[in-house]
Image (spheres, rainbow, N blue to C red):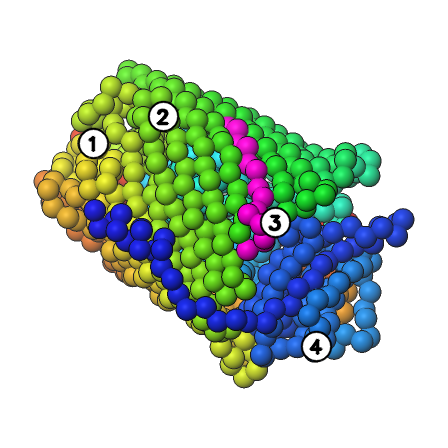
Amino acid sequence: MYRKILFLFLLVIVLPIKAQQFLTGSVYEKDDTGRLNSLVGANILWAGTNIGTTSDINGKFKIPYSTYSKKLVVSMVGYTTDTLSIIYEKSIEVILKVQPKLEKEIEVVGQQQSTFVDYLEVENKSVMTTKELYKAACCNLSESFETNPSIDVSFTDAITGAKQIEMLGLSGIYTQSTLENLPYLRGLISNVGLTFIPGSWVQAINVSKGIGSVANGFESITGQIDVDLKKPSDINDKPFFLNLYGDYDQRFEGNMNYRFMLSDKIQVINLLHYSSRQYKYDMNHDHYIDMPTFKTLNLMQRWHYSFIDGMEGQIGFQYVNDKKEGGTIHSNHYKYGTDATQFNIYGKTGYVFQSENYKSVGIQWSFNNYKNTSHFGLRNYSGEEKTGYFNFIFQSMFGSPNHKYRTGFSFLYDQLNETFLTSNFQRIERIPGIFFEYTYTFDDTFSAIAGARLDQHNYYGTMFTPRLHVRYAPQEDWVIRAVAGRGFRSSNIFTEYISAFASSREVSILTSENFGYGLQQESAWNYGLSLVHYFTFDYREGSISIDLYRTVFDKFTLANLDFNPQKLIFSSIDDGSYSNSVQVEMNFQPMERLDTRIAYRFLESKQLINNNWLDKPLSSKHRVLLNFAYSTEKETKEDPQMFYDLTIQWFDKKRIPSTSSNPTNLQAGENSPSFVLVNAQISRTFFANFDVYIGVENIFDFRQNVLIIDPMNPTGKYFDASLVWGPVNGRTIYSGLRFKL
């Protein structure tokens, strides 16, 4: 009952509102015929501050005046950055030039932040740009969050080399991960899909904390990670991009992006990736390969088209083939292997009414076919999933731009077929749904988004999903955001806990339903409050933020590893898990061109295990992150430049599932030690389109030495390679290059 009361309280809360002055404008480019075309997604930022926004689908923007700066920086990839002096202007028009040109009258050069929060965004959303991704090797999405304090990345086990993410103290399966707002990392792909998006394909990553928008579905619980890919319509960027990578462990990767125009209305981009590691090594001398050998081929092609005024769209496809082998290094005593393939096709079409440009319709659709065949010693697993998705969105307003709304309907189809040992599990999910979302804005000081969706599952029945986001800026340098809402999801227990297959644990399911695995659908409420304060340090702008989030499950799927070290028991329990998250983060420049990020995060994540509230296994309660990024000065775009990046992370101890009933010499202990990881990278830009980088991950070579319990007896009942709490591999030295033409 208290959850409903809190939600209603946030829905009707009335905050004091203060009038504020704003600058409005439009951003254009001029084509060869002299016609002005609106630029979507241009960055508008007050120089030396964190106050910024982006241009909308019509090239328009609105930004509050800054008391600290009168220089407005307007930038976009492929265009010359423009910096304007703003004194009395109320509305401006900016025309960005395609060809790079040094303007003598520009005195202040804007610098794009590596990660930024849109000042006017209602959701607590941060945008990680390519500048942030370039701070580390970032070979794929699983390696893109090393400098992000909100997301934890860790290995799942000592055999497969797979990685998982956590947000707000909960597994990444409760974070909705999308590809340009289309479903992607979900279902059977959730444990491997992070490696299916190469870093060189990524334009930006949008990380939202707390429940997401109802327009994107019902599955978001702790947040949303939306990946924005390189676009075929970015025709003013260099058409050819090459990225090569290699490391000390003989992992090699190559990425090539090639963009071209079929006509002035059709643009295409090809994204190619190939990676491999064939070197086998055993640093801890347990006779098992520390990291599996692999070969991955990944192809994507994207088309963008615009045939009539106000209408544009895109269509694309992706093919992935991923093969891995691991296990014992010099014998066939225990072997691991997996062969996964994915084919994904998707499209979007949007139309903006020319006579009423506030009104638009959009269609999103996708189809994904994923197959996986794996063996873990004597255990075999195979799975296939076919997913279809359709979403229709209509957007308009009630009388004025202060009252906007969007509504629509969606349909999600999932067909799954899995076999583990001799047991087969099949299910089909058909979920039609409708949604409505209302946005109220008052002078951009106060904004609120209230939405709800109603979905009908073919077995679980009706799902009602209310969600609310509130933003309030009592002063220019303070922003308060609040969120509350509910989410649902269906468990995929074998892929989500596939690390347990790398053990001798007997898998059992305590069924309570007659559908799928026999488990209930998961559902949870999420509440959050965020406070951001902008400040000036030695004439340079900084920010400090405090985030408070609570997630409470009313239906939870428990993977019980503590009942018996020789068993894994799945069950559905009511009110069986909750997580509280507190994060404090400060971003500032203590000296010119030295970006500094300091963050501390506290987690209290509990699960009801054997009728006792225990800490979620293998998760740190405390984490500290320090990131320092320094760049040398340059006068023109063609000048060489050096970049130095250093990341230090401290992880508190983690609770290890109980092995107390094992023989003493085969016990893992109750908790892991705390540990520190240090990564560093140096990059050199020789000219505008060529740079080389070299880096070291895990500089001090810290790793979990005992990765496997009873490794010499993989068919015995004590064998367990799933209790991994730290790095599997040690120090990694790598280098690479990036080239544009």
Q: Write down the residue under mark 3.
A: 203
Would residue 616 be visible to someone looking at this image? no
Q: Are marks 3 and 1 in contact (CB under 8 Å)?
A: no
Distance from Cα at disc 3 to Cα at disc 2: 35 Å
Asked if the stretch drawn in magenta spans residue 152, the answer is: no
Residue 113 vs residue 467, the one in the foreground: 467
- The answer to whether residue 693 is above or below residue 392 is below
Q: Write down the residue under mark 4.
A: 88
Q: Earlier in the sequence, mark 2 or mark 4?
A: 4
Quick check: 478 left or right of 58? Answer: left
Distance from Cα at disc 3 to Cα at disc 4: 35 Å
Q: Report the disc number at residue 457.
A: 2
Q: Write down the residue under mark 1.
A: 571
Q: Disc 4 vs disc 1: which is toward the camera?
A: 4
Q: Bin the neighbour count of mark 3 within 10 Å (Cα to Cα): few under 14, some 14-19, many 20 and up.
A: some
Question: Which stretch appears magenta?
Answer: 389-402
